């Protein structure tokens, strides 16, 4: 098990065997862009002249052409104008664009290097037909821009940080067929109603609600999301009262809690969630007695940060 107890910037690890916790995020590769068929029979998307042979995507080539100024909206050549506009919009905001092994644009990060985004950029992102991951930060993002992402049918991960999205903006995304991961950090316009909306997402398995002020009653409804595998409720002051319901989730493998309302009783609730493998606790008022509850779990990773009621002797509880 990985055991990391942080105090300030110092991290002390126990002498027990270390096993790195597996990464939670994975993305599927998109379908390649079709080429013009040479026969009288139409080909399936992603096939070349020989049946079953994948056609290489040209999106990486297009991306470099736009970046180098070889292609412009006024002289697009054979590149879709929507693709050109999307690249230019992200570049203007100093965002990052990544392509996968097949050459498809799959990731846009508008929060990179402390950057931010607006509705203007989000509205253009459907110009990337194989987009799978979007990260954006800033109050310039509202429900109007977020709703435009409903056209990104291959989207797997969406991370919205400190935006002005409201419940209606999240509801606009309910029918995204591939969305598995959603981050809504510090979303001041969201209300308890959004929790009911989240229950309608068909594949959502990773959810980050940190630094939001949802009621305990609303957070308890997360216990109905039977597919959840990762949940981040750090700095959600009402999370402790919801933990008995959340601990009943059958597939929950990782949870993050934080704030001084997190105490030993919270750890006792977590001990009832036998599927847990990874626990993170930040800035909590837990004690050595609380950690004793976690011995009942088969954890592979435990991170404790700024829990000032703990000292090195607390490590003995988990090493025993």
Image (cartoon, grey):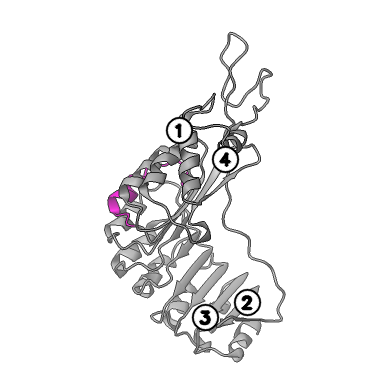
Q: Position of residue 221 (x, y in %)?
A: 34, 61
Marked residue nearer the N-terminal end (2 or 1): 2
Asked where in the image residue 294 lies, by quadrant, the reply is bottom right
Marked residue nearer the N-terminal end (1 or 3): 1
Marked residue nearer the N-terminal end (4 or 1): 4
Q: Residues within 10 Å of mark 3 (few under 14, many from 20)?
A: many
Could you say whether the residue bearing mark 1 is in a helix, strand or loop?
Answer: helix
Q: Which residue is mark 1?
A: 82
Nearer the observer: mark 4 or 1; the answer is 4
Q: Is residue 76 above or below residue 208?
A: above
Spatial distance from mark 1 to mark 3, Cα to Cα? 55 Å
Q: Residue at x 29, y 53 (%)?
A: 167
248 or 136: nearer the viewer: 136
| Dominant SS type (magenta) | loop
Nearer the observer: mark 1 or 3; the answer is 1
Q: Position of residue 20 (x, y in %)?
A: 67, 66
- Residue 106 in the magenta stretch? The answer is no
Could you say whether the residue bearing mark 2 is in a helix, strand or loop?
Answer: strand
- Tell whether label 4 touches label 2 (CB within 8 Å): no
Of the numbered discs in the image, which one, if any, rests on residue 3?
2
Q: Give the magenta-colored segment's residue range.
A: 164-179
Marked residue nearer the N-terminal end (2 or 4): 2
Residue 181 visible in the displayed image: no
* Horizontal side, residue 230 vs residue 300: left or right: left
Spatial distance from mark 2 to mark 4, Cα to Cα? 45 Å
Nearer the observer: mark 2 or 1; the answer is 1
Of the numbered discs in the image, which one, if any, rests on residue 67?
4
Q: Residue at x 72, y 75 (%)?
A: 17
Q: Which residue is mark 3?
A: 293
Asked where in the image residue 160 lies, by quadrant, the reply is bottom left
80 or 246: nearer the viewer: 80
């Amino acid at each position: 098990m990985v055991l990391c107890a942080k105090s300030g910037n110092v991290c002390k690890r126990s002498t027990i065997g270390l096993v790195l916790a597996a990464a939670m995020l994975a993305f599927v590769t998109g379908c390649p862009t079709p080429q013009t068929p040479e026969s009288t029979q139409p080909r399936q998307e992603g096939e070349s002249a020989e049946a079953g042979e994948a056609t290489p995507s040209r999106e990486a080539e297009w991306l470099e052409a736009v970046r180098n100024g070889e292609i412009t909206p006024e002289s697009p050549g054979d590149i879709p104008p929507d693709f050109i506009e999307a690249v230019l919009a992200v570049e203007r905001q100093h965002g990052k664009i990544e392509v996968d092994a097949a050459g498809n644009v799959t990731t846009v990060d508008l929060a990179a290097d402390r950057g931010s985004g607006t509705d203007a950029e989000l509205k253009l992102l459907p110009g990337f037909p194989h987009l799978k991951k979007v990260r954006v930060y800033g109050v310039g993002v509202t429900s109007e821009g977020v709703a435009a992402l409903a056209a990104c049918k291959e989207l797997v991960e969406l991370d919205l940080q400190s935006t002005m999205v409201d419940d209606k903006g999240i509801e606009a995304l309910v029918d995204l067929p591939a969305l598995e991961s959603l981050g809504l950090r510090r979303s001041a316009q969201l209300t308890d109603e959004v929790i009911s909306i989240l229950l309608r997402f068909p594949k959502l398995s990773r959810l980050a609600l940190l630094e939001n002020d949802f009621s305990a009653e609303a957070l308890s409804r997360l216990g109905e999301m039977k597919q959840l595998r990762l949940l981040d409720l750090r700095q959600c002051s009402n999370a402790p009262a919801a933990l008995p319901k959340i601990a009943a989730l059958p597939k929950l493998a990782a949870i993050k809690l934080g704030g001084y309302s997190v105490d030993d009783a919270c750890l006792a609730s977590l001990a009832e969630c036998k599927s847990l493998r990874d626990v993170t606790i930040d800035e909590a008022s837990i004690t050595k007695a609380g950690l004793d509850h976690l011995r009942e779990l088969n954890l592979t990773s435990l991170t404790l940060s700024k829990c000032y009621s703990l000292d090195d002797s607390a490590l003995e509880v988990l090493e025993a």
